[in-house]
Amino acid sequence: MAQGIKMPTTEDLMSMWQASGLKQKIIFTFIMIAAFRLGVQMPLFGINNQVFANIAQGNNIIGFLDLFSGGALGTVSIFALGIGPFITASIIVQLLSVVIPSLEKLQKEEGEAGRRKLSQYTRVFTVILAVFQSLIFMLYLHHLPGAVLPNLNPMMFFISSVVVLTAGSVLVMWLSELITEKGIGNGGSLIIFVGILSGIPVYASRTTQMVANSPSLQFGLFMLLAIFFAAMVFIVIMQEAVRKVVIVNPKRQVGNKVYGGMNSFIPFKLNPGGVMPIIFAIAILLFPSTILSLVGQANFKSYAMKNFVMSLNHWLSPDGITYYILYFALIVALTFFYASIMPNMQPKDIADNLKKYGSSIPGIKPGKPTAEALDKILTKTTFIGAMGLGIIALVPSLASYVTNIKTLQGIGATSLIIMVGVALDLINQVRTHLLARNYESFLKEK
């Protein structure tokens, strides 16, 4: 079921750099990433960054969000909200596309024009969510002693900060869309990928200081890294594994020659959603957790209300078992969701196309029986992929608790899956581009 992945050689890299169009895409992608990293280093005016940075180190939720923002949240930069509002808005629009017929029609029947309208709706939701999150964030900072510098006009500072944070989030969304359109890879995933990479030196430094004088922790770190490595291997297998469904093509005679008749196959990926179920599951879980964490800092007059907010926050925080149960369930559900909306994984459409061209699956009648058989195959395949993805996401995180090395919890399985998945997607896109260029060169020579 699994397909091997060939790593790029020196010859591949030279071809990649010499290929017309690809070099420009790579350079453009690097420029956009550099622009994002520049924005991460630009602090929001009027904020004592160190006060919030100290809290981020001791708060798992804020620390986790800071990791995905590439350190922008911890330094309270203009990109503090990061790609989060855009990812959450994408989830909302995609879920609404399933339950609202008009949006479903835009997605499946309107073609490129429909997708542009859905993208516009996503941008509007991004702005709304960015305004809401920036309001909550600024309210939290105002209640944090020493976070806001003195001698500032409270109203003007609050409004200007909300505007700047919202504009920063929209700018990050724009950069990600530019990378997707004119660069290489998925822009949103790449921005998260770069954010995770930028946080690795900090986590490595903290872990080194923690295990320096403890042989038992050093052994635990060795075991944890071994589990991380095993998780990376299984991630690659999950990303590249496919279920091949054999297709019998009809023969046709033209003159004295017979064409066709050779068997082919339809490849169904074991993990059709790639890293997106993981990213979306985190976004869904962390959104209420972040709001509850920030609201919990407020001074409630009612002890019962404060206790209720703190209890909910504990249940949804990455420290509790409830978080991991919900995390696993969301990964499974979102993997099935992605399989259901992908155009190349629709049993009825595939069966109709096979019947149209006279092809068939051995031993299965064309039409409805073929669609039912494909639906069973896809259900089993997606179930295996969803369960595997969920288990891979949980094991290294649980291993952090067993080994008592929690400094690497932020770059645990979730970050590993995202990094490996984005890297594999990037390599595959480069190879596809190179093959297309080579094919064009071959046609020109002909």
Image (spheres, rainbow, N blue to C red):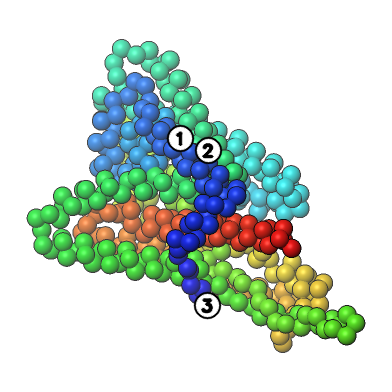
- Who's the residue at 56% across and 68% down the image? 269
Q: In the shown orientation, is residue 69 left or right of residue 379? A: left
Q: Position of residue 304 (x, y in %)?
A: 33, 39
Residues 266 and 414: in front is 266
Q: CA distance from mark 3 to mark 1?
A: 41 Å
Q: Position of residue 277 (x, y in %)?
A: 50, 57
Of labels 1 and 2, the one closer to you: 1
| Mark 3 secondary-structure assignment | loop
Residue 35: give its label.
1
Residue 181: give its label.
none
Q: CA distance from mark 2 to mark 3?
A: 37 Å
- Who's the residue at 63% across and 48% down the image? 96
The answer to whether residue 136 is visible is no
Residues 20 and 389: in front is 20
Which quarter of the picture shows residue 375? bottom right
Q: Which residue is mark 3?
A: 1
* Looking at the image, residue 135 lies above or below residue 184: above
Question: Of callouts 2 and 3, which one flags the residue occurring earlier in the amino acid sequence?
Answer: 3
Do labels 2 and 3 touch, CB within 8 Å? no
Q: In the shown orientation, is residue 211 left or right of residue 143? A: left
Q: Amino acid at mark 2?
A: Leu
Question: Of callouts 3 and 1, which one flags the residue occurring earlier in the amino acid sequence?
Answer: 3
- Who's the residue at 34% across and 14% down the image? 152
Residues 22 and 322: in front is 22
The answer to whether residue 99 is visible is yes
Q: Position of residue 175 (x, y in %)?
A: 52, 38
Of labels 3 and 1, the one closer to you: 1
Do labels 1 and 2 touch, CB within 8 Å? yes
Q: Which residue is mark 2?
A: 175
* Looking at the image, residue 367 lies above or below residue 444: below
* Looking at the image, residue 318 lies above or below residue 354: above
Q: Amino acid at mark 3?
A: Met
